[in-house]
Image: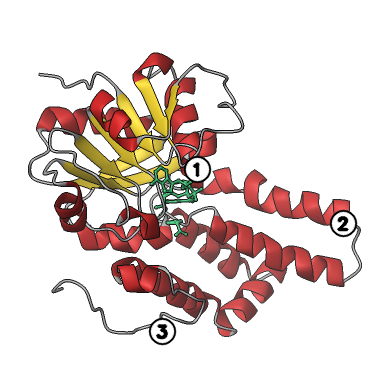
Amino acid sequence: MSWQPRRLGIIGGNGWLGRAMAEAMLGSGWLPPDALWLSGRTLPAQPLISGQPVHWTTDNQQLLNQCDAVILSLRPQDFFALSLRAENTLLISVMAGISVAELSAHAACSAVVRCMPNAAIAIRGSYSPWLASAEVSAAQRRWVQSMLSTWGSEDELEEEDHLHYLTGLSGSGPAFPALLGRAMSEHALSRGLPAHVVNRAVEGVLVGASPLLAGQNEGPARVAQRFLDYQGTTAAALITMIQEGFEQAIHHGLQAAEQAAFNMTPETMNSRTPDSVPVGAPRTKGDS
Ligand SMILES: NC(=O)C1=CN([C@@H]2O[C@H](COP(=O)(O)OP(=O)(O)OC[C@H]3O[C@@H](n4cnc5c(N)ncnc54)[C@H](O)[C@@H]3O)[C@@H](O)[C@H]2O)C=CC1
Ligand SMILES: O=C(O)[C@@H]1CCC=N1
């Protein structure tokens, strides 16, 4: 048996992710524009890139009345101020750190899905792990899978802790190669190379070489080892980077993101600064 909502809504539909999700679902032909409702605090200054005639509203209740599946795509710190009753709605959250239990309690809704896409939705290349409350039926799960497939690839998870962890690893996704690229650019520019050459060299590394790593389990580890075994100039760079703490910095960064996701409470949401979540700090929410 299949499940199909009459209409799908996105609360926060004018944001970075909201617009990207809408474009992906429309652009793939998965959703007709008339079946999509988007809400924002104000009506958008710009239509969707695709120019498709979707419904826009500033009234979240109107959106809820129209739609039987609704994606929550507002910032976590705006969630608890949102007045929401979604009893008969399949509620799908992309928000970092707001648990299934919190979603369910705040929205008076038992059928809840959490997923964690990343900014690569814009090119339909997101990896989006997700999990569902027990009240989400098998048919609804299949529908969720098909929706997430328009954003890129997906995996259903069993444990919410794993979603908190992946909020950093894959949810932050494009930010990490971007940081690597920034460090490489800064160094090359400091050595006097022309900016256009630096830009093309870094893009070649991050974008051109990435397909080398695609689709292979353990791919990055094998590729790195092959260069280490070669014992050439690349190994000189890798050995120095490893000795200088490259991997430790990555591990600490992922741990900091996990802690930030796990400890997202109304108190921490508005007060997070780069050093406000110490690495290795004890977990404070939940019992695991
Ligand atoms: N940007 C990213 O790369 C990722 C973001 N996320 C999650 O996605 C969610 C959305 O993130 P972004 O799109 O980046 O944020 P954003 O700030 O670009 O968009 C949020 C939108 O929600 C709107 N909004 C706030 N309160 C509202 C209300 N009461 N009713 C209707 N609209 C309201 C804002 O005006 C804004 O347009 C966040 O919870 C974030 O944790 C998850 C994975 C990746
Ligand atoms: O940086 C953030 O808070 C969002 C949530 C997960 C990835 N990006």
Q: Name the residue carrying label 1.
A: 15
Amino acid type of disc 3?
Answer: Pro
Give the residue displayed 15% in from the left and 73% down from the top: 288
Percent coordinates x, y for residue 49 in the rendering: 59, 26
Q: Mark 2 or mark 3, which is nearer to you?
A: 3
How far across and down, in percent of the image, does residue 87 sit? 13, 38
Inter-mark Cα distance, 1 to 2: 32 Å
Label 3 secondary element: loop
In terms of sequence position, does the residue under pointer 2 or pointer 3 come before the other?
A: 2
Choose top left, top right, bottom left or bottom right for residue 252. Answer: bottom left
Give the residue displayed 8% in from the left and 45% down from the top: 134
Q: Residues within 10 Å of mark 2 (few under 14, many from 20)?
A: few
- Residue at disc 1, CB closer than 8 Å to ligand 1: yes
Residue position marked by numbered label 3 in the rendering: 278
Q: Secondary structure at mark 1?
A: loop
Q: In whole angstroms, how far apart are the C-alphas of marks 2 and 3?
A: 36 Å
Residue at x 55%, y 33% (from the top left corner): 44
Q: Give the mark nearest the N terminus, 1 or 2.
A: 1
Amino acid at circle 2: Ala
Residue 67 seen in render = no
Residue type, numbered disc 1: Gly
Q: Is residue 279 above or below residue 181?
A: below
Q: Is residue 12 left or right of residue 213?
A: left
Residue 12's place in the image compared with 48, above or below, is below
Residue neighbourhood size for the residue with mark 1, other residues' Cα within 10 Å, grouped as few (<14), some (14–19), many (≥20): some
Disc number at residue 195?
Answer: 2
Q: Nearer the viewer, residue 84 or 203?
A: 84
